[in-house]
Structure formats: C-alpha cells, structure tokens
Amino acid sequence: DARLDSALQGGIIVRESRRQETHRQLYDEDHVNYTVHISQHKDTLFVNGKSLQSNFLINTNTRYRFRLIHGGVCPVILSIASHPLLIIAMDGSPVAPKMTEAVEFAPGERVDFIVTANKPVSTYDFNFKPSSDQCLFKLKGKVQLVYNATGDAAGNILAESKVKSKVIEESSLKSGKPVKLRQGVLVHSLPSSPTSLVLT
C-alpha cells in the first residue's frame, strides 16, 4: 500500500507510574528495546524496520514485558519457541492476564505480553505464521530470543520469517475451539495446555 510505504511508523510508549501500573508485579524489565513493531513493504515483512538477522537479548530468570505493534496489512500469528506468552494488555488497556502459546493480531492492533527467561541458555526463534493462504509475506532472516551467557546488561537488535493471514470467526465452543474471553478476544484452549490467543 503506497500510503503505508510513505507513512512514518513507530511506537510511542506512555507509561503509568509504577504504583498505578496494573500488572507491574508480573515483570522485571520494561524497556523500549523489547518493542516488536511489524511493518511491511510490498511482499516483505519487517520487524522494527529490519530485514537482517536480529535478536532480543535477555538474561536468565528475568521477566520481560514485550510491546507488539502491528503496522502491516494482514493479520499475523506470533509465537516464541519454548516460551509461552502472558498477555497483559491489548490496544493500550490492561486485561486479565492470560497465558497462551501464540497470539493472532490484526493490522493496527497492539498487544503487550510477558516472556519469562527460564529456559536453557540458547537462542529461540520468534515464529510469524500464516493463518490462511489469502495473504503471504516473506521474511529474509530471523528474529530470535537470545539468552545472554555473559550476564551483562541485555540489549537488543532484530529480523524475520514468513507470514500470511486470515480472519478467525468467533465461536463459543468447548475444549479445543475458540472461547470468548472478552470483546474482540478469542482464546484457543486445549485441555491443561495454553494454545493461542486470537484478536479479532
């Protein structure tokens, strides 16, 4: 879309005081380095404007608040290998915390989630997956969660994968089917296991 290509995009984060922040006790780090801004140019998807291999550096036993902003055209499903996502806010408003393995979000939507760095020191891929063949995008590199083996203060970079999209219809079915959580939010639940949160 020519209008998106020529537009200025990015994140503006307005924080409440620690005392007023609803879910402040659930995370340790809330830094601009952990903003995930999705944009696209023609058939290429970018994360924070980059198309090369990139990383979010994290320290073990630390909880990070990530802020996800969708400035692209088609819905995206995001997950992080071996790391569940604790959703705490949508479109700037706090919600009841919900653990999920993946979140689907549409253009213009914002999602805040917490990632707990409690896995073995390694690298873990951010996965951007399609929900249909109606809208395909290419990512030339990878976005990774990288555990900091040195213990130094964590920093940040970024990259890519492959994306498509679809509109998931809302339904109120039992286990394994979408269940209404609140206005505009569907959770895909499996017995005793978080699956995916869908914003529609």
Image (tube, rainbow, N blue to C red):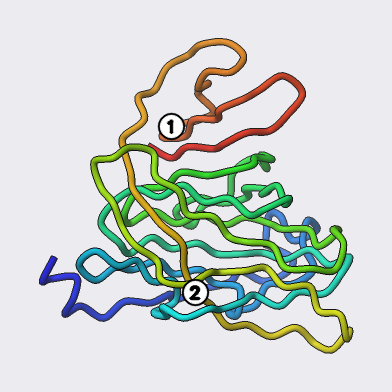
Residue 15 rendering spot, x and y as whole percentages = 58, 72
Residue name at image x 69 percent, y 85 percent: 155
Question: Which is nearer the N-term, disc 1 or disc 2?
Answer: 2
- Secondary structure, mark 1, is loop
Secondary structure under tag 2 reads loop
Residue lying farthest to the left in this orientation: 2
Answer left or right for 112 relative to 92.
right
Mark 2 highlights which residue? 159
Q: Is the residue 33 above or below the residue 95 in the image? A: below
The image's mark for residue 155 is none
Specify the label residue 183 is tagged with.
1
Please state which of residues 14 and 146 is positioned toward the viewer in this rendering: 146
Q: How many marks?
A: 2
> Which amino acid lies under the numbered mark 1 shown in the image of this protein?
Gln
Quarter of the image with the N terminus is bottom left
Instruction: Please state if 43 lies on the left or on the right of 89 as rendered.
Output: left
Q: Residue furthest bottom?
A: 152
Q: Residues within 10 Å of mark 1 (few under 14, many from 20)?
A: few
In percent of width and height, residue 122 lies at 79, 68
Horizontally, residue 41 falls left or right of residue 75, namely: left
In this rendering, the answer to whether 176 lies above or below 111 is above
Report x, y in % for residue 184: 41, 35
Contact flag, marks 1 and 2 (Cβ < 8 Å): no
- At 46% across and 81% down in the image, what residue appears? 52
Q: Nearer the viewer, residue 180 or 72?
A: 72
Label 1 vs label 2: CA separation? 32 Å
- Residue 188 location (% of width, % of height): 56, 27
Identified at 89% across, 84% down, the residue is 151
Q: Is residue 50 above or below residue 133?
A: below
Q: Is residue 96 above or below residue 126?
A: above
Quarter of the view holding residue 17: bottom right
Image quadrant in which you'd find residue 67: bottom right
